[in-house]
Image: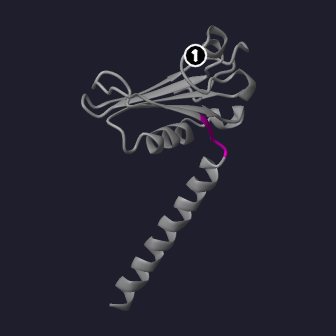
Amino acid sequence: MTRYFTRLVLVALCLGCSGSNDARLFDDFHEIGRFRAPNVHSLYPAVTHFVVAPRALMGDRNAVLAYSRRSCLEEQVCFVHFWVDASKAAKRFPISDSEAEAIVASYDRNRSTGHDGFQCYDFGVPGEQCAAR
């Protein structure tokens, strides 16, 4: 019984530690805008998140996906667009051409179809990309 209890406590501590690491990691993502569609159809996003994150963090595919999936946790259809430069980032729709050109990554999830997609774009610097596979 004591052995079982000790294992349970260790598992709880490990889960707590990993959650706090995620929370600290997620602090580096900054949602600067959110658009919630007034007339939701299953093919269109219920919500779109506009997010700025440090260039170095965008190189961590697991962190970007974890943040994206957490942002879309409650939504049937959800998009997340990422920028590394807040001065070039969109905060709402419509997105201008220059804001669209500055997007470094986007994530979309559709629970109706099971789609869970991530698209990475280059930073405009040859050889430098975000979270590539």
Coordinates of residue 108 in the picture (x, y in percent): 42, 28
Coordinates of residue 5 in the picture (x, y in percent): 38, 85
Q: Could you say which is closer to the camera, residue 122 or residue 93?
A: 93
Q: Quarter of the image holding residue 86?
A: top right
Identity of the residue furthest to the front in this view:
38
Coordinates of residue 6 in the picture (x, y in percent): 43, 83
Left or right: 41 in relation to 19: left
Q: Residue at x 61, y 20 (%)?
A: 103
Coordinates of residue 118 in the picture (x, y in percent): 46, 27
What residue type is disc 1 on?
A: Ile
Boundaries of the magenta span: 28-32
Q: Quarter of the image holding residue 24?
A: bottom right
Instruction: Indicate whether 72 appears above or below 3.
Output: above
Mark 1, other Cα within 10 Å: few <14 / some 14–19 / many ≥20: few
The secondary element bearing badge 1 is classed as loop
Q: Quarter of the image holding residue 81?
A: top right
Q: Which residue is mark 1?
A: 95
